[in-house]
Image (cartoon, rainbow, N blue to C red):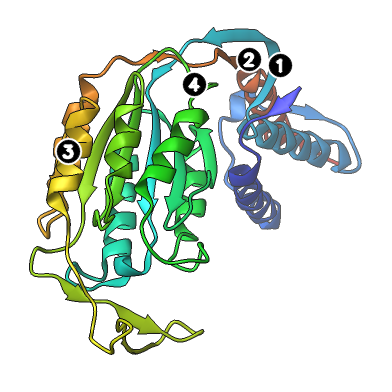
Amino acid sequence: MEWGNLKDSIAFAGILAAIFLFIFGFKKRKEIIEMIRFKVDVHNQFFKKTLMVSGLFFITLSLLDPKILTGFIPIKEKGLDIYFLIDVSKSMLSEDVKPNRLERVKQSILELLDLLPGDRVGLIPFASDAYIQLPLTDDYEMVKMFLDSVDTEMMGGGGTNIAKALEISKDSFENAGNGERVLILFSDGEEHNEEALKAAKKLSKIRIYTLGVGSLEGSLIPELDRNGNKIGFKKDSEGNYITSKINLKLLNDLALSASGRSYTLSLAGNEIHLLYDELEFLKRGEKKESQSKDYFRLYQFFLGFGILLFLLGYFYESKS
C-alpha cells in the first residue's frame, strides 16, 4: 500500500487532534438525537473514547490517500530534440542588451522552456572551445539548474568558435529520437572566419535557429575581477578599447544554410514567441515510452469506517 498525500495531511491531522481535545473538554453538552442514543451500563468511558479516537485515526488515514498499485499504463509522448548553443565568450558581457548579453540569453531560454510542451533539450556552452554541459533531457528543473551556472568563466580561452559547437552538437544527436533535430544558437556572431558556415553546411537533417544578441553600434566589453566586479573595459594589444558588434550576416547565413530562421533578441522579447511558433510546425517524434502507475484508491473505505466509529463513540453513553 502507498500513501499519496502524506505531507499535507500531517498538518490536517493536527487539526483533527485539536477538535478531538475540544470535544472531550466539554463538560456539558446538549443531548442530540436522543432517540438514536443507546445506553449501556458501563462504569467508565474508556470504550467510548477508544471508538472516537479510532474513528479520528481512520479519518486521518483516509486523508493520506491510501492506494494499492494495480499495474502500469504505457505512455507514448512526442517531442523535438533541441540543443541550446550558448555563446559564453567575453564579448557576451557587453551591456548593449540589458542586463548584459549573456543574462539576456539565459532569460530568453527560461522563457522558451515555459512554452515548450515537454520537448527534450540540452545545453552546449561554447567560446574558443565547446562541450556538452547537459545531454538531452525533459527534466526542465535540471535544465534550469545547469543554465543558472552558465557564465563566461566556463571556458579557459577567449574568442568565439561556433564551428566547434556545431560539430559537437552533430555527434550529440546520435541517440536522439525520430523527430526533428533542432539547434538554437544564442550568440553575437563574432566569429571572424568562415569555419562556422562550413560546419553548418555539413549538418544533415538538423535545423539551426539563430538568436542574435547585441547591437550594430557595438559596445565595450567589461573587464571583471575575480569577484565579478567591473574594473574597466577590455583593450587590444595597442591599448585601444575593443568594441563588440553583432554579426547579423553570419547568424542569418547559418540559419538559412540549415533550413532555419534568424532572430535578434530585443527589449520587447517577442522573438521567443515567434521562434516557438516556428517550432510548433516541426515534426515531433516519439520519445522513449514511459509508464504511469495505475492505482486503486482506498480512501473512501477508510473515511466511511472512520466516520462510523466516531459516531458510535460520540453517541455512546455510559452511566454508573
First in sequence: mark 1 vs mark 3: 1
Label annotation for residue 253: 3
* Label 3 vs label 2, nearer the camera: 3
First in sequence: mark 1 vs mark 4: 1
The amino acid pointed to by label 4 is: Ala
Decide: few, some or many residues near mark 2? Use Cα within 10 Å; few <14, some 14-19, many ≥20: some
Decide: few, some or many residues near mark 3? Use Cα within 10 Å; few <14, some 14-19, many ≥20: some
Asked which secondary structure carries label 3, the reply is helix
Mark 1 lies on residue: 68
Asked which secondary structure carries label 2, the reply is strand
Mark 4 lies on residue: 176
Q: Residue at x 53, y 43 (%)?
A: 134
Q: CA distance from mark 2 to mark 4?
A: 32 Å
Asked which secondary structure carries label 4, the reply is loop
First in sequence: mark 1 vs mark 2: 1
Mark 2 lies on residue: 295
Q: CA distance from mark 1 to mark 3?
A: 58 Å
First in sequence: mark 4 vs mark 3: 4
The image quadrant where one finds the N terminus is top right
Asked which secondary structure carries label 1, the reply is strand
Q: CA distance from mark 3 to mark 2?
A: 53 Å
Q: Position of residue 260 (x, y in %)?
A: 20, 29
Task: Indicate whether 319 appears above or below 36.
Answer: below
* Label 4 vs label 3, nearer the camera: 3
The amino acid pointed to by label 1 is: Ile
The amino acid pointed to by label 2 is: Tyr
First in sequence: mark 2 vs mark 4: 4
The amino acid pointed to by label 3 is: Asp
Q: Residue at x 67, y 20 (%)?
A: 67
